[in-house]
Amino acid sequence: MADWQADLVDRMSNIQFTEQYFPILHNGLLQDQDVMVHSLGCSVWNTLGHELELMAVVECPAPSSHGADIRSDSGWFVMGESRPSCLVEFERYDGTEKGLLKLEEKLRNLLEAAQRWEHSPKILVLSAWRQGIVRAVDTERLKNICRTGFTSNTGARISASSISKIVFSEFLFEKNATELSLTLNRLRCERLL
């Protein structure tokens, strides 16, 4: 297996991977209905995990810890191992403060899940999708959470100190002329930590 961490960032920095495996994201037929985009995004991440020769698990539950149930949208395991090497969350972002707070919550979930897994994940991916022209994600706020950590609802101190890489990924959709359908026209990745 090659350097799957570098391959992850490389493949999710351009649209060739999604064009090959998920043409509906590019052909103008995707409608923003219910949770279809979320389901497709989670499928993209799981498929990429398999392509990178990892075992990708949907709704990967973190070990219980007298607190909230945390399930990452995708968890990737090196074959034969029982702890994930990568955790992914995929979430809609609408450009509002409420949308950014939701991304911050998902980032905290990733960090807490990694701690519950005794810091086995080497990479965490917070992936967001947005449509049309909306305010960009304030990645400085996300980076601050990564740098300073936080205290969970149960009072546990959560930090990212032993995680080697935290990546923010964005799926940028364009609304078609009728505004009834979406077309993925760009992917980008940015390292948070």
Image: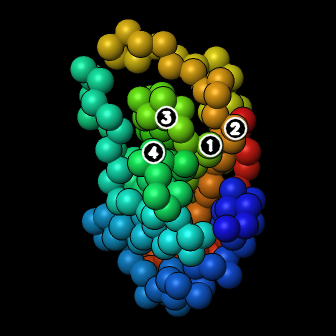
Q: Secondary structure at mark 1?
A: loop
**Mark earlier in primary sequence (2, 4):** 4
User: Where does residue 171 sit, x and y in percent of width and height?
Assistant: 59, 63
Q: Which residue is mark 3?
A: 114
Q: Which residue is mark 4?
A: 83
Q: Which residue is mark 2?
A: 164
**Mark earlier in primary sequence (1, 3):** 3
Q: Residues within 10 Å of mark 2 (few under 14, many from 20)?
A: few
Q: Which residue is mark 1?
A: 122
User: Where does residue 103 sit, x and y in percent of width and height?
Assistant: 50, 40
Real-space Cα distance between discs 4 and 1?
11 Å
User: Where does residue 65 sit, x and y in percent of width and height?
Assistant: 29, 24
Whether residues under marks 2 and 4 lie with C-beta atoms below 8 angstroms apart, the answer is: no
Viewer-proximal residue among 67 and 140: 67
Q: Amino acid at mark 3?
A: Ala
Q: Report the disc number at residue 52.
A: none
Mark in front: 4 vs 1: 4
Q: Secondary structure at mark 4?
A: loop
Viewer-proximal residue among 32 and 108: 108
Real-space Cα distance between discs 2 and 4?
16 Å
